[in-house]
Image (cartoon, rainbow, N blue to C red):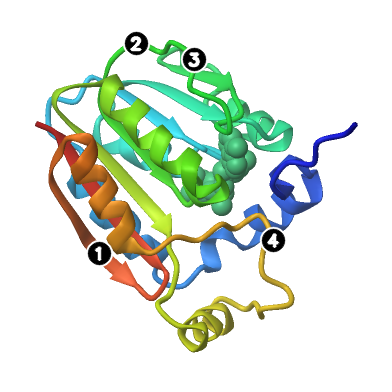
């Protein structure tokens, strides 16, 4: 018997190519990225980027913190190729192939874990489990910064958001498993994160952060 898992199109090179060709045009994303950068603490030494894609956000963080060592995780062959190309020759960045539907491998401890528009591709139960794994990977006082695609409170607001980024309900990515901000903030607090908040939001794009207290 074949078991069919949740839809996730990110292993398709066409899907990746379409995203990378349009990534710069997503409204307001640079504001969210700038907000994320503010939350990477000075003195950060070791960073983990989950669902790194072509390493776009990790590259921005390393521009500000060039002394950092980083681990970049993704499962998409085309993205892995792109991120390896971006950081070719940079021995401080390690790229790891891993499907986050399964628990993270042993990666050591980090001063910051970041993720950008990736965790919403996991089913809700796995999102929560991953947040707990992230908590356990952080050094005391370290940050989790999740720039995320979250659910709208109503179907009308969801349609409006899609329209703003050039999609419709028919053409939106079926890999998305969107969850509201409030539930995710509550989970982070229950897991033990402190100073949990949504620091920036534009429609369905949000920056959620928590500190390993
Ligand atoms: C919308 S892209 C974002 C990429 C990058 N973080 C950025 O901000 O441009 C989503 C990324 O999540 C990755 N991803 C989705 N599901 C995943 C999974 N189950 N395991 C690992 N990576 C996954 C995809 O391969 C893709 O690189």
Q: Residue at x 20, y 60 (%)?
A: 199
Q: Residue at x 13, y 25 (%)?
A: 43
Drawn side of residue 51 relative to residue 16, left or right: left
Q: Residue farthest to the right?
A: 1
Label 4 crowd (10 A; few <14 / some 14-19 / many >=20): few
Question: In 3D space, how far apart are the residues under numbered discs 4 and 3 (Cα atoms)?
Answer: 27 Å
Q: Quadrant of the C terminus?
A: top left
Question: In 3D space, how far apart are the residues under numbered discs 4 and 2 (Cα atoms)?
Answer: 33 Å
Numbered tag placed on residue 174 in the rendering: 4
Is residue 67 visible in the rendered image? The answer is no
Q: Residue at x 22, y 59 (%)?
A: 198
Mark with earlier residue (4, 1): 4
Label 3 crowd (10 A; few <14 / some 14-19 / many >=20): few
User: Which residue matches tag 1?
Assistant: 200
Q: Secondary structure at mark 1?
A: strand
Q: Are marks 1 and 2 in contact (CB under 8 Å)?
A: no
Residue 160, image x, y percentages: 51, 86
Q: Are marks 4 and 1 in contact (CB under 8 Å)?
A: no
Q: Report the image quarter containing ligand 1.
A: top right
User: Which residue matches tag 3?
Assistant: 105
Q: Is residue 136 above or below residue 31?
A: above
User: Which residue matches tag 2?
Assistant: 108
Residue 82, image x, y percentages: 64, 35
Label 2 crowd (10 A; few <14 / some 14-19 / many >=20): few
């Amino acid at each position: 018997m074949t078991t069919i898992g949740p839809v996730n199109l990110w292993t398709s090179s066409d899907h990746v190519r379409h995203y990378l060709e349009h990534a710069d045009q997503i409204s307001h994303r640079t504001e969210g990225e700038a907000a994320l950068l503010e939350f990477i603490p000075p003195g950060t030494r070791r960073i983990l980027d989950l669902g790194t894609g072509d390493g776009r956000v990790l590259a921005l963080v390393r521009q500000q913190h060039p002394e950092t060592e980083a681990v970049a995780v993704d499962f998409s062959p085309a993205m892995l190729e792109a991120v390896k190309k971006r950081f070719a020759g940079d021995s401080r960045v390690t790229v790891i192939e891993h499907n986050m539907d399964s628990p993270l491998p042993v990666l050591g401890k980090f001063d910051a874990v970041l993720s950008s528009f990736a965790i919403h591709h996991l089913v809700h139960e796995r999102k929560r489990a991953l947040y707990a794994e992230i908590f356990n990977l952080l050094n005391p006082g370290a940050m989790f910064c999740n720039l995320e695609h979250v659910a709208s409170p109503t179907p009308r607001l969801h349609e409006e958001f899609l329209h703003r980024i050039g999609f419709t309900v028919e053409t939106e990515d079926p890999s998305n498993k969107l969850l509201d901000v409030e539930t995710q903030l509550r989970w982070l607090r229950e897991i033990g994160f402190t100073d949990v908040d949504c620091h920036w939001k534009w429609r369905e794009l949000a920056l959620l952060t928590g500190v390993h207290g």
